[in-house]
Amino acid sequence: MAIILPFRAYRPARHTSAEVASQSYDSYDPKVRESLINSEKVSFLKIIGGAYKTYPKSPLSRYKAVRKAYENAIKNGVLVQDAVETLYFYKIQTAAGKTYLGTIACLPVSSYDDNTIRKHEDTLTARESIFETYLGTVNFNAEPVLISFPDNELVTQLIIRFTQSAPIDQFSCSNGHQHTIWAISQPDDIDTFQSAFNNIPHLYIADGHHRAASSSRLAGMRKDQNSQQFLTFLISESQLQILEFNRFITDFNGHSVEEFLRLICHSFEVKALGQQFKLPDKAHQFTLYLKGQCYELTVKDHYFLEKHNPIENLDVYILNTLVFGPLLNITDLKSDSRVQFAPGNQSVQELQNRIDQGDFKAVFGLYPITAQEIRNVADQKMTLPPKSTYILPKLLSGLTIYEMS
Protein backbone atom coordinates (compact mmCIF):
# COMPACT_ATOMS: atom_id res chain seq x y z
CA MET A 1 0.00 0.00 0.00
CA ALA A 2 1.35 3.42 -0.95
CA ILE A 3 1.69 5.93 1.88
CA ILE A 4 2.03 9.64 1.14
CA LEU A 5 2.83 12.26 3.76
CA PRO A 6 2.15 16.00 4.01
CA PHE A 7 4.94 18.35 5.06
CA ARG A 8 5.60 22.02 5.77
CA ALA A 9 7.45 23.21 2.71
CA TYR A 10 9.82 26.12 2.53
CA ARG A 11 8.84 27.97 -0.63
CA PRO A 12 9.96 31.15 -2.40
CA ALA A 13 8.40 34.30 -0.98
CA ARG A 14 5.23 35.47 -2.70
CA HIS A 15 5.70 36.49 -6.37
CA THR A 16 9.39 35.44 -6.43
CA SER A 17 9.24 31.80 -7.60
CA ALA A 18 10.20 32.62 -11.19
CA GLU A 19 13.44 34.12 -9.89
CA VAL A 20 14.19 31.77 -7.01
CA ALA A 21 13.38 28.29 -8.39
CA SER A 22 16.07 26.87 -10.66
CA GLN A 23 16.98 23.88 -12.73
CA SER A 24 19.29 21.28 -11.19
CA TYR A 25 22.90 22.44 -10.94
CA ASP A 26 24.32 20.02 -13.52
CA SER A 27 21.68 20.76 -16.17
CA TYR A 28 23.02 24.23 -16.95
CA ASP A 29 25.61 25.04 -19.56
CA PRO A 30 28.68 25.95 -17.44
CA LYS A 31 28.93 29.49 -18.84
CA VAL A 32 25.21 30.15 -18.31
CA ARG A 33 25.44 28.73 -14.79
CA GLU A 34 28.41 30.95 -13.95
CA SER A 35 26.57 34.01 -15.23
CA LEU A 36 23.47 33.22 -13.16
CA ILE A 37 25.46 32.57 -10.01
CA ASN A 38 27.28 35.90 -10.40
CA SER A 39 24.11 37.86 -11.16
CA GLU A 40 22.21 40.03 -8.68
CA LYS A 41 19.17 37.75 -8.82
CA VAL A 42 18.32 35.79 -5.70
CA SER A 43 17.99 32.22 -6.94
CA PHE A 44 18.27 28.77 -5.47
CA LEU A 45 21.09 28.17 -7.94
CA LYS A 46 23.12 30.79 -6.05
CA ILE A 47 22.51 28.96 -2.77
CA ILE A 48 23.95 25.80 -4.29
CA GLY A 49 26.37 27.20 -6.86
CA GLY A 50 28.05 29.87 -4.78
CA ALA A 51 29.34 27.19 -2.46
CA TYR A 52 30.70 25.15 -5.37
CA LYS A 53 32.66 28.19 -6.53
CA THR A 54 34.02 28.98 -3.07
CA TYR A 55 35.00 25.43 -2.12
CA PRO A 56 35.72 23.57 -5.38
CA LYS A 57 37.97 20.95 -3.73
CA SER A 58 36.40 20.50 -0.30
CA PRO A 59 33.01 18.77 -0.52
CA LEU A 60 32.22 18.93 3.21
CA SER A 61 33.08 22.63 3.41
CA ARG A 62 30.96 23.18 0.31
CA TYR A 63 27.99 21.37 1.81
CA LYS A 64 28.28 23.40 5.03
CA ALA A 65 28.36 26.58 2.95
CA VAL A 66 25.21 25.46 1.11
CA ARG A 67 23.46 25.00 4.45
CA LYS A 68 24.58 28.44 5.61
CA ALA A 69 23.42 30.10 2.39
CA TYR A 70 20.09 28.29 2.73
CA GLU A 71 19.68 29.50 6.32
CA ASN A 72 20.50 33.04 5.22
CA ALA A 73 17.82 32.81 2.53
CA ILE A 74 15.31 31.91 5.23
CA LYS A 75 16.56 34.66 7.52
CA ASN A 76 16.28 37.23 4.71
CA GLY A 77 12.77 36.15 3.76
CA VAL A 78 13.74 34.65 0.40
CA LEU A 79 12.31 31.31 1.54
CA VAL A 80 9.22 31.10 3.76
CA GLN A 81 7.85 28.00 5.50
CA ASP A 82 4.16 27.12 5.31
CA ALA A 83 2.40 27.20 8.66
CA VAL A 84 0.88 23.71 8.61
CA GLU A 85 1.52 20.33 7.02
CA THR A 86 0.31 20.39 3.45
CA LEU A 87 -0.02 18.32 0.28
CA TYR A 88 0.76 20.19 -2.93
CA PHE A 89 -0.52 19.71 -6.48
CA TYR A 90 1.85 20.90 -9.16
CA LYS A 91 1.27 21.48 -12.88
CA ILE A 92 3.87 22.19 -15.53
CA GLN A 93 2.59 23.48 -18.87
CA THR A 94 5.47 23.45 -21.36
CA ALA A 95 5.94 25.96 -24.15
CA ALA A 96 5.19 23.11 -26.56
CA GLY A 97 1.81 22.48 -24.91
CA LYS A 98 2.64 19.35 -22.90
CA THR A 99 1.05 19.21 -19.44
CA TYR A 100 2.32 17.37 -16.38
CA LEU A 101 0.10 17.33 -13.27
CA GLY A 102 0.90 15.51 -10.07
CA THR A 103 1.39 15.67 -6.32
CA ILE A 104 4.30 16.93 -4.27
CA ALA A 105 4.48 14.96 -1.02
CA CYS A 106 6.92 13.08 1.15
CA LEU A 107 7.20 9.29 1.11
CA PRO A 108 8.45 7.18 4.01
CA VAL A 109 11.92 5.71 3.57
CA SER A 110 10.50 2.45 4.91
CA SER A 111 8.44 2.15 1.70
CA TYR A 112 11.68 2.32 -0.28
CA ASP A 113 13.35 -0.25 1.95
CA ASP A 114 10.49 -2.78 1.79
CA ASN A 115 10.17 -2.44 -2.03
CA THR A 116 6.76 -0.74 -1.97
CA ILE A 117 8.67 1.90 -3.93
CA ARG A 118 10.26 -0.05 -6.74
CA LYS A 119 13.45 0.63 -8.69
CA HIS A 120 14.56 -0.07 -12.24
CA GLU A 121 18.10 1.31 -12.11
CA ASP A 122 21.30 0.23 -10.37
CA THR A 123 22.89 2.84 -8.14
CA LEU A 124 26.58 3.37 -7.54
CA THR A 125 27.66 2.95 -3.92
CA ALA A 126 30.19 5.78 -4.16
CA ARG A 127 27.58 8.17 -5.51
CA GLU A 128 25.08 7.09 -2.84
CA SER A 129 27.69 7.90 -0.21
CA ILE A 130 28.29 11.37 -1.67
CA PHE A 131 24.57 12.13 -1.68
CA GLU A 132 24.20 10.77 1.86
CA THR A 133 26.94 13.09 3.15
CA TYR A 134 25.40 15.99 1.26
CA LEU A 135 21.90 15.36 2.65
CA GLY A 136 23.22 14.82 6.16
CA THR A 137 25.00 18.18 6.03
CA VAL A 138 22.53 20.45 4.23
CA ASN A 139 19.52 18.80 5.91
CA PHE A 140 16.99 19.53 3.19
CA ASN A 141 15.49 18.02 0.02
CA ALA A 142 15.15 20.69 -2.66
CA GLU A 143 14.53 18.59 -5.78
CA PRO A 144 11.81 15.92 -5.59
CA VAL A 145 12.41 12.34 -6.67
CA LEU A 146 10.10 11.66 -9.64
CA ILE A 147 7.71 8.81 -8.76
CA SER A 148 5.14 7.18 -11.04
CA PHE A 149 2.20 4.88 -10.41
CA PRO A 150 -0.36 3.10 -12.64
CA ASP A 151 -3.24 5.39 -13.54
CA ASN A 152 -5.88 5.48 -10.81
CA GLU A 153 -9.30 6.99 -11.48
CA LEU A 154 -9.97 8.06 -7.88
CA VAL A 155 -6.60 9.82 -7.55
CA THR A 156 -7.20 11.58 -10.86
CA GLN A 157 -10.68 12.72 -9.81
CA LEU A 158 -9.39 14.07 -6.51
CA ILE A 159 -6.56 15.98 -8.16
CA ILE A 160 -9.07 17.56 -10.56
CA ARG A 161 -11.29 18.45 -7.60
CA PHE A 162 -8.54 19.97 -5.49
CA THR A 163 -7.11 21.98 -8.39
CA GLN A 164 -10.39 23.78 -9.00
CA SER A 165 -9.53 26.21 -6.20
CA ALA A 166 -7.24 29.22 -6.56
CA PRO A 167 -3.55 28.28 -6.78
CA ILE A 168 -1.12 29.37 -4.11
CA ASP A 169 1.58 30.08 -6.71
CA GLN A 170 1.70 30.61 -10.45
CA PHE A 171 4.56 31.82 -12.62
CA SER A 172 6.33 31.46 -15.97
CA CYS A 173 10.00 30.74 -16.61
CA SER A 174 12.26 32.13 -19.31
CA ASN A 175 11.86 28.91 -21.35
CA GLY A 176 8.12 29.57 -21.65
CA HIS A 177 7.04 26.86 -19.20
CA GLN A 178 4.17 27.80 -16.89
CA HIS A 179 4.11 26.47 -13.33
CA THR A 180 1.09 26.31 -11.02
CA ILE A 181 0.82 25.03 -7.43
CA TRP A 182 -2.28 24.27 -5.36
CA ALA A 183 -2.34 23.15 -1.74
CA ILE A 184 -4.60 21.29 0.68
CA SER A 185 -3.98 21.56 4.40
CA GLN A 186 -7.34 20.66 5.96
CA PRO A 187 -6.92 17.30 7.77
CA ASP A 188 -10.09 15.84 6.18
CA ASP A 189 -8.88 16.70 2.68
CA ILE A 190 -5.45 15.23 3.38
CA ASP A 191 -7.01 12.04 4.78
CA THR A 192 -9.23 11.72 1.71
CA PHE A 193 -6.31 12.02 -0.67
CA GLN A 194 -4.08 9.70 1.36
CA SER A 195 -6.86 7.09 1.39
CA ALA A 196 -7.00 7.16 -2.41
CA PHE A 197 -3.51 5.67 -2.45
CA ASN A 198 -4.58 2.69 -0.32
CA ASN A 199 -5.46 0.73 -3.46
CA ILE A 200 -2.14 1.49 -5.15
CA PRO A 201 0.14 -1.39 -4.12
CA HIS A 202 3.42 -0.06 -5.52
CA LEU A 203 5.08 3.16 -6.60
CA TYR A 204 7.94 3.34 -9.13
CA ILE A 205 10.98 5.59 -9.23
CA ALA A 206 11.02 7.25 -12.62
CA ASP A 207 13.98 9.56 -12.01
CA GLY A 208 16.15 10.12 -8.94
CA HIS A 209 17.33 6.64 -7.93
CA HIS A 210 20.50 7.92 -6.25
CA ARG A 211 18.63 10.56 -4.26
CA ALA A 212 16.17 7.96 -2.99
CA ALA A 213 18.95 5.49 -2.15
CA SER A 214 20.93 8.13 -0.27
CA SER A 215 17.83 9.07 1.75
CA SER A 216 17.55 5.42 2.75
CA ARG A 217 21.19 5.33 3.81
CA LEU A 218 20.80 8.50 5.85
CA ALA A 219 17.63 7.22 7.52
CA GLY A 220 19.56 4.17 8.63
CA MET A 221 22.20 6.36 10.23
CA ARG A 222 19.82 8.83 11.89
CA LYS A 223 16.72 7.85 13.82
CA ASP A 224 14.95 11.21 13.96
CA GLN A 225 11.53 11.30 12.31
CA ASN A 226 12.37 14.00 9.76
CA SER A 227 15.12 11.81 8.28
CA GLN A 228 12.70 8.93 7.76
CA GLN A 229 11.01 10.47 4.72
CA PHE A 230 12.02 12.17 1.48
CA LEU A 231 10.61 14.63 -1.02
CA THR A 232 8.82 13.34 -4.14
CA PHE A 233 6.67 14.36 -7.08
CA LEU A 234 4.08 11.64 -7.75
CA ILE A 235 2.61 11.43 -11.22
CA SER A 236 0.48 8.83 -13.01
CA GLU A 237 2.12 6.79 -15.76
CA SER A 238 0.04 8.40 -18.50
CA GLN A 239 1.40 11.81 -17.46
CA LEU A 240 5.03 10.75 -17.86
CA GLN A 241 6.86 11.40 -21.08
CA ILE A 242 9.34 8.59 -21.69
CA LEU A 243 11.87 9.30 -24.41
CA GLU A 244 14.73 7.24 -25.73
CA PHE A 245 18.47 7.73 -25.63
CA ASN A 246 19.84 7.45 -29.16
CA ARG A 247 23.40 6.20 -29.62
CA PHE A 248 26.36 7.69 -31.48
CA ILE A 249 29.41 5.56 -32.28
CA THR A 250 32.89 6.77 -33.16
CA ASP A 251 34.07 3.76 -35.20
CA PHE A 252 33.05 0.38 -36.59
CA ASN A 253 35.57 -1.69 -34.63
CA GLY A 254 37.83 -2.15 -37.66
CA HIS A 255 35.01 -3.09 -40.05
CA SER A 256 34.40 -1.20 -43.26
CA VAL A 257 30.95 0.34 -43.66
CA GLU A 258 30.04 -2.36 -46.19
CA GLU A 259 31.20 -5.17 -43.91
CA PHE A 260 29.40 -3.66 -40.92
CA LEU A 261 26.12 -3.52 -42.83
CA ARG A 262 26.62 -7.08 -44.03
CA LEU A 263 27.14 -8.29 -40.46
CA ILE A 264 24.02 -6.46 -39.29
CA CYS A 265 21.99 -8.37 -41.88
CA HIS A 266 22.55 -11.58 -39.88
CA SER A 267 20.21 -10.35 -37.16
CA PHE A 268 18.11 -7.67 -38.85
CA GLU A 269 16.02 -7.14 -41.94
CA VAL A 270 17.70 -4.06 -43.45
CA LYS A 271 15.88 -1.51 -45.60
CA ALA A 272 17.31 1.69 -47.09
CA LEU A 273 15.15 4.73 -46.22
CA GLY A 274 16.92 7.51 -48.07
CA GLN A 275 19.26 10.36 -47.22
CA GLN A 276 17.35 11.81 -44.25
CA PHE A 277 17.75 10.32 -40.80
CA LYS A 278 14.50 9.12 -39.24
CA LEU A 279 13.56 7.54 -35.93
CA PRO A 280 11.85 4.12 -35.81
CA ASP A 281 8.05 3.84 -35.81
CA LYS A 282 7.69 0.89 -33.45
CA ALA A 283 9.41 -1.37 -30.97
CA HIS A 284 11.96 -3.96 -32.15
CA GLN A 285 12.86 -1.64 -35.00
CA PHE A 286 15.93 0.61 -35.16
CA THR A 287 17.25 3.18 -37.56
CA LEU A 288 20.89 3.65 -38.51
CA TYR A 289 22.38 6.69 -40.21
CA LEU A 290 25.87 6.67 -41.70
CA LYS A 291 27.62 8.12 -44.74
CA GLY A 292 24.55 10.14 -45.78
CA GLN A 293 22.19 7.14 -45.80
CA CYS A 294 19.49 6.03 -43.36
CA TYR A 295 18.58 2.37 -42.86
CA GLU A 296 15.69 0.70 -41.09
CA LEU A 297 16.72 -2.34 -39.02
CA THR A 298 13.98 -4.78 -38.00
CA VAL A 299 14.89 -7.59 -35.60
CA LYS A 300 14.50 -11.00 -37.19
CA ASP A 301 11.95 -13.29 -35.55
CA HIS A 302 14.45 -15.95 -34.54
CA TYR A 303 15.84 -13.63 -31.85
CA PHE A 304 12.64 -13.90 -29.82
CA LEU A 305 12.57 -17.71 -29.61
CA GLU A 306 12.69 -18.75 -25.94
CA LYS A 307 12.94 -15.14 -24.73
CA HIS A 308 10.88 -14.87 -21.53
CA ASN A 309 12.88 -12.36 -19.54
CA PRO A 310 11.41 -8.80 -19.72
CA ILE A 311 14.91 -7.36 -20.13
CA GLU A 312 15.66 -9.51 -23.18
CA ASN A 313 12.71 -8.07 -25.09
CA LEU A 314 13.77 -4.45 -24.59
CA ASP A 315 15.25 -2.69 -27.59
CA VAL A 316 18.16 -1.29 -25.59
CA TYR A 317 19.12 -4.84 -24.59
CA ILE A 318 18.60 -6.18 -28.11
CA LEU A 319 20.88 -3.52 -29.60
CA ASN A 320 23.56 -4.26 -27.00
CA THR A 321 23.28 -8.01 -27.56
CA LEU A 322 23.17 -8.08 -31.38
CA VAL A 323 25.31 -5.07 -32.32
CA PHE A 324 27.26 -3.26 -29.63
CA GLY A 325 28.75 -6.36 -28.02
CA PRO A 326 29.49 -8.77 -30.89
CA LEU A 327 30.09 -6.31 -33.73
CA LEU A 328 31.53 -3.22 -32.04
CA ASN A 329 33.13 -4.80 -28.95
CA ILE A 330 31.40 -2.24 -26.76
CA THR A 331 30.54 -4.19 -23.61
CA ASP A 332 30.38 -1.44 -20.97
CA LEU A 333 28.23 1.45 -22.10
CA LYS A 334 29.00 3.40 -18.93
CA SER A 335 32.72 3.64 -19.57
CA ASP A 336 33.41 3.06 -23.28
CA SER A 337 34.21 6.41 -24.92
CA ARG A 338 33.35 5.02 -28.38
CA VAL A 339 29.62 5.37 -27.64
CA GLN A 340 27.83 8.56 -26.66
CA PHE A 341 24.19 9.20 -25.95
CA ALA A 342 21.67 11.75 -27.18
CA PRO A 343 18.40 12.16 -25.26
CA GLY A 344 15.20 11.91 -27.27
CA ASN A 345 14.41 15.61 -26.91
CA GLN A 346 17.16 16.42 -29.40
CA SER A 347 15.93 16.93 -32.95
CA VAL A 348 16.48 14.36 -35.68
CA GLN A 349 18.21 17.00 -37.78
CA GLU A 350 20.62 17.75 -34.95
CA LEU A 351 21.51 14.07 -34.71
CA GLN A 352 22.05 13.80 -38.45
CA ASN A 353 24.24 16.90 -38.46
CA ARG A 354 26.63 15.33 -35.96
CA ILE A 355 27.27 12.53 -38.47
CA ASP A 356 27.41 14.74 -41.56
CA GLN A 357 29.89 17.05 -39.82
CA GLY A 358 32.15 14.14 -38.92
CA ASP A 359 31.70 14.22 -35.14
CA PHE A 360 30.72 10.54 -35.18
CA LYS A 361 30.63 7.70 -37.69
CA ALA A 362 27.00 6.67 -37.16
CA VAL A 363 23.92 7.11 -35.02
CA PHE A 364 21.38 4.49 -33.97
CA GLY A 365 17.79 5.65 -33.42
CA LEU A 366 15.67 3.77 -30.87
CA TYR A 367 11.98 3.55 -30.06
CA PRO A 368 11.06 4.61 -26.49
CA ILE A 369 10.44 2.08 -23.74
CA THR A 370 6.92 2.12 -22.28
CA ALA A 371 5.92 2.68 -18.66
CA GLN A 372 4.53 -0.86 -18.60
CA GLU A 373 7.92 -2.26 -19.64
CA ILE A 374 9.67 -0.28 -16.91
CA ARG A 375 7.15 -1.55 -14.38
CA ASN A 376 7.63 -5.17 -15.52
CA VAL A 377 11.38 -4.86 -14.99
CA ALA A 378 10.98 -3.23 -11.56
CA ASP A 379 8.41 -5.80 -10.42
CA GLN A 380 10.90 -8.60 -11.09
CA LYS A 381 13.62 -6.71 -9.18
CA MET A 382 15.66 -6.30 -12.33
CA THR A 383 17.37 -3.23 -13.75
CA LEU A 384 17.35 -1.58 -17.15
CA PRO A 385 20.55 -1.35 -19.21
CA PRO A 386 22.37 2.00 -18.98
CA LYS A 387 20.78 4.97 -20.76
CA SER A 388 17.50 3.21 -21.45
CA THR A 389 15.19 6.15 -20.79
CA TYR A 390 15.10 9.92 -20.75
CA ILE A 391 12.08 10.77 -18.63
CA LEU A 392 10.20 14.04 -18.40
CA PRO A 393 9.28 16.22 -16.61
CA LYS A 394 12.56 17.53 -15.26
CA LEU A 395 11.74 19.24 -11.99
CA LEU A 396 12.82 22.59 -10.59
CA SER A 397 14.93 22.88 -7.45
CA GLY A 398 13.96 25.14 -4.59
CA LEU A 399 10.26 25.34 -5.41
CA THR A 400 9.05 23.23 -2.46
CA ILE A 401 11.80 22.33 0.01
CA TYR A 402 11.53 19.62 2.65
CA GLU A 403 13.42 20.66 5.78
CA MET A 404 14.97 17.69 7.59
CA SER A 405 16.58 19.28 10.65
Image: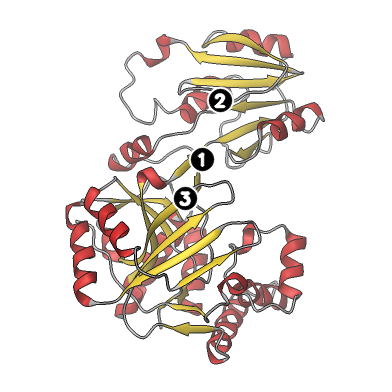
Q: Which residue is mark 1?
A: 386
Q: Helix, strand, or loop for circle 1?
A: loop
Distance between the alpha carbons at the discs numbered 1 and 3: 27 Å
Please name which of the two marks, 1 or 3, marks the residue nearer to the observer: 3
- Height in image: 101 above or below 141? above
Residue at the image point whose x is 44% and y is 34% from the top:
369
Report if the CB atoms under discs 3 and 2 are less than 8 Å apart. no
Which residue does the numbered mark 3 point to in the structure image? Answer: 99
Residue 347 on image: x %, y %:
66, 36
Q: Which labelled disc corresponds to residue 279?
A: none
Amino acid carrying label 1: it is Pro
- Tell me which amino acid carries mark 2: Gly
Q: Give left or right: position of 198 versus 160.
A: left
Toward the viewer: 296 or 281? 281
What is the distance, in whole Å, between disc 3 and disc 2 at their CAs?
39 Å
Q: Which mark is first along the chain, 2 or 3? A: 3
The amino acid type, in three-letter code, at marker 3 is Thr
Residue 115 seen anywhere in this rendered image of the structure: no
Dot placed on the residue nearer the N-terminal end, 1 or 3: 3
Instruction: Give the residue number, with chain letter if any, for mark 2.
Output: 325
Along the line of sight, the residue nearer the viewer: 215 or 93 = 93
Tell me if residue 114 comes above or below residue 339 in the rendering. Answer: below
